[in-house]
Image (cartoon, helix red, strand yellow):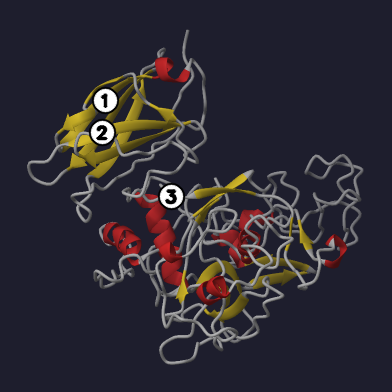
Amino acid sequence: MKRKLLLSSILLGLTTSLLHLHAAPQVSNVLANQKEGTKLVDITYDLVLEGGQTAYVEVWFSHDDGFTFPISVQATSGDVLAGVQGGTNKSIQWDAEKDWDSRFTPKGKIRIIATYGNEPSGFSGTGDAGSQSSQADASLVSVQWGPFAWTHDGSLWHSNDHTWLSNAFSDGGATAPTNIAVDPQEITNIKWNEVVEWGKQNGYSSLQTVSITGDNEELPVTNITFWEALQWCNARSEKEGLIPAYYTDPNEILGDHNDDGNYTNGNDTFSAWSPAQDTNMNGKWDPGENFNDLNSNGKYDGREFFDLNNNGTADLGLSTIYKSGAEIPNWGKSLHDSGDNYSYIQGLINWNANGYRLPDIILARKLLTGGSHKKKWPWGDTLDPVELNAQVRASTFPSQYSGPTPASTRQPNGFGIKDLLGNVAEWSESGHNPGDGLMIELYGGSYKSLGGSSPFGGATNFNPAHMWETNISGSSSTRSPEIGFRCVRYK
């Protein structure tokens, strides 16, 4: 009987060793082919090692499109386990039926991890590869999406007194995922350089490495623009075999409001999210249902896309990955058409991509709660001076720091995430154009720069009783020693 396919795509990975911190084994060109009619999988890969070294090679399998890798592949032969030498076209044969109990998935992915020496990497399969791994998503933590309150007035908790966000997941109108993967700390200088070095060989010509010293490897990378953060997210995605999220040519068909696949540019509208119009709640207009007959012709014409480039056609877009250049044209702008508002941001993001993105400001606020939105602070209701000095904006409470500090000096919040409130401010994905230039939302931050001021007015307007007032806006092209970033994955 013909077997269903296990694999839809491949994800490759790398690791470091204790003895070769800056020259990790390099795994590339991972390919897998399932033999027709069986659950036997042939895997090939290339492996670069320092001269004379061998590596321990392990294989992990994901059934959820790379979000986790819970299956440790054991039924293997070939260039796997201890003693593997470097070279091209290394091969592994996997009997998947023995390791995965005859199950199927359309979202299978494989990860190859190589580590110097004769011991495995310590990767747990859940996204944690241990402290010695440089695998890009090895340390991401999983945060469950759900309702949360984003204001707190500093008094006793009363749920009616606060602004609630429950279904405000702003992923292009898509249903919120069950879990979101988040970097547990801000991107460090060493992690930045790892991706940039790969990116410069793969079309990311605008990205530049930062100078590394023994004292700054684990400090947050700063002095990068919003645009460089987006390019780095894309490079990180491609480096790992994931689908990048950011593009320079917009998808106009996101304006297909009723999701019926028709993109006529008429004058009428239909709201698939409105029970008053979509009476059977099937997501499309059906004869007999209400619509806004703006042209008064008695029939449903539909306004199915926004012609962002004014060429008269509905363009699929999302074909040019954002790899270089000063900016993505029109990011943050909106098109107003007969009362509807359509943001270019909606069309410039591939909402189905499984790669890395910056969090938008709503997700940032969710993450800031640490899972305890009834508390005044992510760590509780107590204003402990040590935590304040380490995590709160220095213009409100004098800080012992004159610059960024390693995330290792602080405790994580309830989600396992550090420095969402504190250390450097972070770029978010949310932006708007007020008419005099693009402004991007930033959040967090805890110190003033060595010059004594911030390009965004220092850490002003922070009230310890309103921990959710943590965001400010700044120009997308700004470079500041106070601004860094972290990444998230939605799929």
Of callouts 1 and 2, the N-terminal one = 2
Question: Does the CB distance between marks 1 and 3 fall below 8 Å?
Answer: no
Q: Position of residue 408 (x, y in %)?
A: 41, 62
Q: Is residue 75 above or below residue 487?
A: above
Residue position marked by numbered label 2 in the rendering: 57
Q: Position of residue 380 (x, y in %)?
A: 66, 63
- Regarding mark 3 in the picture, which secondary structure is present there? loop
In the rendered image, is residue 277 in sight? yes
Dot in front, 1 or 2: 2
Question: Does the CB distance between marks 1 and 2 fall below 8 Å?
Answer: yes
- In space, the residues marked 3 and 2 are separated at their CA atoms by 19 Å
Locate residue 165 relative to residue 76 in the image: left or right.
right
- In space, the residues marked 1 and 2 are separated at their CA atoms by 10 Å
Q: Is residue 67 above or below residue 479?
A: above
In-front residue for pair 9/136: 136
- In space, the residues marked 1 and 3 are separated at their CA atoms by 26 Å
- Regarding mark 1 in the picture, which secondary structure is present there? strand
- Badge 1: how crowded within 10 Å, few (<14), some, or many (20+)? some
Question: Does the CB distance between marks 3 and 2 fall below 8 Å?
Answer: no
Badge number at residue 92:
1
Residue position marked by numbered label 3 in the rendering: 139
- Inspect the image, locate mark 1, and give the three-letter code of the amino acid beneath it: Ile
Locate residue 85 relative to residue 491 in the image: left or right.
left
Of callouts 1 and 3, the N-terminal one = 1
- Regarding mark 2 in the picture, which secondary structure is present there? strand
